[in-house]
Every structure is written in structure tokens, then in C-alpha cells.
Image (spheres, rainbow, N blue to C red):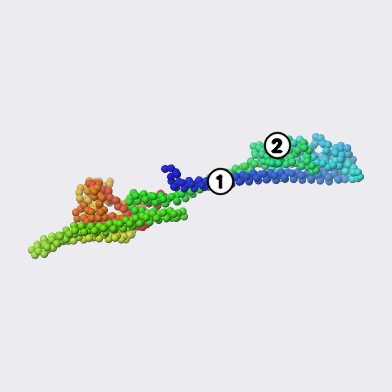
Amino acid sequence: MRISTSLTNRIFLACTLLVTLALALAFGYLYWRTSEDAETELGRELDESGVLVQEYQASLTDTFARMARLVADLPKLKAAVETADPPTVQPLADEYRREITADVLILTGRTGNVLATSGVALPSIPSDASDPSLREHATFWLLEHGLLEVTSVPIVLDGTPPDILGRLTVGFLLDAARAQQFKRLTGGEIAFLAGDRVVASTVRVGDLTSVATLPRREGPIALSLGGEEFLGRSRPLALEGGAPPGELAPAALVLRSRTERLRLLSTIRSGLVGALIVAILLATILSYAVARTMTRPLSAVTSAMRDIAATGDLTRKVTLTTGDWQDEDARLLATTFNTLTDSIATFQQAEAQRDRLSSLGRLSTVIAHEVRNPLMIIKAALRSLRRADASDAERREAVADIDEETRRLNRIVSDVLDFARPMHFERREVDLNALCQTSVDAAWADAPDAHVALDFDPGLPVITTDAERLRTALVNILTNARHAVAAGAATARGPVGVVDADVYVSTRRDVDRALVTIRDRGVGISADDMAHIFDPYFTTTRGGTGLGLPIAKNIIEGLGGHIEIVSVPGEGTELRITLPAHNVSDRFSLGAEGRP
């Protein structure tokens, strides 16, 4: 059977595929949005870091420019510079550099000669430091271990015209230490570039050898440094009063790690994949459960119909277990099926009753044959009694004939009434084993030495039935078995352990039904007679009414049971009776496969 041919599988696969597709799209969209948001956030943080770097650099430039002006205007410094004596000027240069926390401080005289230098050792003093004009200017000096940003202001004595005593130059160094300060401020990696050279960086300079050659563009730059992915943005380092010299083109490169973000995204992706797998598993289980709740009623009805076809028992019913998942459509289907079986059972009972009533039309033949003969015998016996010369023996024989024929007439009338009248049952809990035992005792009341084997199931529970009616049916069946055994020599063998038994009676439990088996070693039933054994007034024994088995069948079917006969001529007959364990109106609960 292909998977697609099962309604359960189709519903299950459809639900599972739909849920899987919906979850995959939802999780995929969530991951895509998360990735997009992460990239957007990284770009935003990179822009903010670039702005912070420029603002911090501009703030340092402005601070040192103001400090340089203040120091250059100090009388003490002016007096020392006016002496043009380096030993006098040097201590002041060291003192003021420390006070303003500059990396370098240079003092030059009127002629541009260097009076004092303090701080970072310089290989040479650029000409900017000895400019004799009144102009203030700022520039960058490229050093071996960093980029020095300097501001130079004149030292002037007030007068007309002003007297230029010399020039004060102060600067701060953009080196690895300063890059670490910028990193703490921005939270990203920092590199200082000058032309095609990386002068300082918070990452290994060797990893940035190709960075300096990148074009200075405003957009983000994707870099791979030391096996780690970065997103960078170049920001020019501007000076107060104008742009720096073009040959240096100093800039700050701000870097943000994409690897860390990708690692976070990888963690999110792993979590989403795990959640997707769990959700799909739960959806699969739930889909199968929903599919089973939808198709189980069909399986239950199909199983009940299969049992009806196999056994012919139209009293089989379907009951769905109650619960939170009980489906109303399934309940309606089961109720409709049970109503159908009830209607069929009712119709069968009514049809059987009509058959019995129609059979009364044939009763005249039975009465003409069965009743007239006893009446003739009674009439002859009465004549013998009227004779005055009748002997005592003749009188006793006449009385015995009257008594015997009267019992025969009474039995005929009782059988006809039992068959014709509607049956009303009074159900109660009954021990079926004990009922079978009393039925056997009644059938063989006048033959206590009969060979009857009993095999009762000790675990058989009590059943709900009409004990008196069922006993009547069992006695009729057992009486037929007794007559069949007496009619000829039996050749069949019973089950192991009862090989000498003429009649074998057993009880067994069949799930929630009870099974009674009666097997005899009689003459058996021919194929022609087998078709009529349940027909009213059909009999193969002299003196029988032909109503014993029809009455038994009516009783058993009226109690919700079923009777079947298997017979082999010359070997014996086996009759099986199946009875419900509960009232026929009760419904049987279904197991996982829907079978009662």
C-alpha cells in the first residue's frame, strides 16, 4: 500500500508539510531580519565611532592650542625667552610641558634658533617651529613611532609694532597609547594612517600593511585581519584653521569586528535551527495525533462492518472513547452506524415475528398431524374405559395412554405458544458456567450416567442476560444433542481428555463476549437438512414438533447473541453460541485498532 492511499497518511503528511513550510519561512525570515539588523547596527556603531574619533581629535587640537596661547603669554616665559639663554629657558620648557601634559614642547628665539626642547626626541626641528611671523599654525609631523600633531604660536611683547621674541610649539602624539585611548572611547579598533603608512594601531601593524593603500572613501571597508573579519571606515584628521598637508593625508581608521557579530548570529542561528527541529517534531506528533482522531472512527466502523460480515452478528456496535480530543463528526458517524445496526436488529426481530406468525398458518397441518393422533388414542382409551367388561389391566393401560398423550398435547401447545408469542426478556447478571451446568442436569435428568464432558472457563466473568430464557434455549439444544447421540453409533472423537464423552460442553471468553460450544458425537445432519434446521415445524425425529431449535435461535438472537452450526454426517455436530457480556443495548468500547 502506498503512503498516499491512506487517509491518515495524507492528512498527516499535509499537516506536517504545511507546518514545516510555515515554520521554515518564519524562522528563515527571523534569521534574515536578525542578520540585516545586525549589519545595520554594526554600520551605525561604526559611524558613531568615526564621529567620536573626529570629535575627540578636534577636542585635543583645540585644548592644546588654547594651552599654547596661555603659556606663550606668561611673563615668566617671555622674560626667559628674551634672554636667549638655553640653560635659562630649558627648565621652563620642561615645567610647562608637564603642566599641559604635552608630548613635545619647543621654544625658539628671535632668529629661529632653538632655545629648548622637551618631551619626545625629534630627529630634527621642522621649520614650522621657527617661523618669525605672527601667524598661528597647526600641522602634523611624521615620526618613526607615531604621528605628532603640533600647534605653533608666537611669543610677543606688546607694543607698536609688536616685538616677536620667538615661538612656542606644543604637540601631542598619535601613537599606540593614544590609539588605546581612542579604542576605550569608541569600543572599536583604531589605526592612524599617514599617506601609505600605518603609524600606530591597536591591532598588529603587520595585519594592516594593505590598509594604508586603500582609497580614502566614505563608505565602509570590509577587511580580514589575522583571520578575523572587520568592517572599517576611514575618517580624516582635520586641523584647526585648515586641512593638513596633502602629502601626509592623515586619517583614523575605525574598525568593528564582524566576526563577533557573526558569532552571535551563528549562536542565534543554531538556536533557531534547534527550535525549528523541536517545533517540527512537535508538529509532526501533533499532526499524526490529529490525523488519528479523524480517521479512527472510520477504522472503528470498518472493523465493525468486517466483523458483521464475518459473523453475521448485526448487533455489533461502535463506541468512541470520550476525552478532550473527541470529535463531534466522529461521534455522529458512530451514532449513525449504531442507529443503523439497531434498526436492522429491530427489523430482524420484527421480520422474525412476522415469520413466526405466518408460520401459524402452517400450524393447521401440524395440529392435524400431531394433535389428531393423540386425540384418537385418547378417544380409543375412553371407549375401553366405558366397557363394562374391561379388565383392570385394560383400564390401567387406557389411563396410561391418556396420560401420555395428554403430556404430548401439552408439549405441543407450549412449543407453539413459545414460538408465536413476542419474547420479553428480564436481564440480570448471571454466572454462565453455573447456568450451563443446570442446563446439562435438566437435559439428562432421567439419564444420570450419560457421558457428558464439561470444560468451563474459570475466568469467565458474569454476563448480563435473561437466565430462564437462555436456560430454555440450552436445554432444547442439549436435548437435540442427546437424541442425536441416541439415534446412532457415534464415530467422532472429542477433544483431548474427553475422548469417551458423547457430548462436550465448554465456555470461553472472547474479548468482551462469551462463547458456549456444544459438540455431540451423534449421527450428524445432512447437507439437505442443514438448510432447514431453523425452519419452524421442521423435524427429523418421530414425535418432535420442529420448534426446539427455532425457539432456541429466537431466544439467543433476542439476547443479542449469535448461533452457528457445523455438522458432518456420521461424525457429529458442533454448535457455537456467542453472547454479549453486557446488555445488548450497551456499546462495546473500542481498542486502538477499533476492534471490539
Q: Residue furthest right?
A: 160
Q: Amino acid at mark 1?
A: Leu
Give how far across and how far down residue 523 sits, in percent. 22, 48
Q: Is residue 310 left or right of residue 128?
A: left
Give how far across and how far down residue 405 sits, in percent. 17, 60
Give how far across and how far down residue 407 sits, in percent. 19, 60
Whole-number angstrom distance, CA of label 2 to CA of label 1: 40 Å
Q: Residue at x 29, y 56 (%)?
A: 352
Q: Is residue 50 left or right of residue 393?
A: right
Q: Quadrant of residue 125?
A: top right
Q: Secondary structure at mark 1?
A: helix
Q: Is residue 268 left or right of residue 129?
A: left
Q: Can the viewer see residue 519?
A: no
Residue position marked by numbered label 2 in the rendering: 214
Q: Quadrant of residue 402?
A: bottom left
Q: Residue at x 76, y 42 (%)?
A: 238
Q: Which mark is residue 25?
A: 1
N-term mark: 2 or 1? 1
Q: Residue at x 81, y 35 (%)?
A: 124
In the image, is residue 113 above or below residue 185?
above
Q: In which quadrant of the rendered image does the N terminus lie?
A: top left
Q: Amino acid at mark 2?
A: Leu
Question: In the image shown, does 411 or 369 lie closer to the viewer?
Answer: 369
Q: Secondary structure at mark 2?
A: loop
Question: In the image shown, does 189 or 413 lie closer to the viewer?
Answer: 413
Q: Is residue 45 left or right of residue 540?
A: right
Give how far across and how far down residue 292 sits, in percent. 45, 49
In the image, is residue 335 above or below residue 497?
below
Question: In the image shown, does 89 or 553 lie closer to the viewer?
Answer: 553
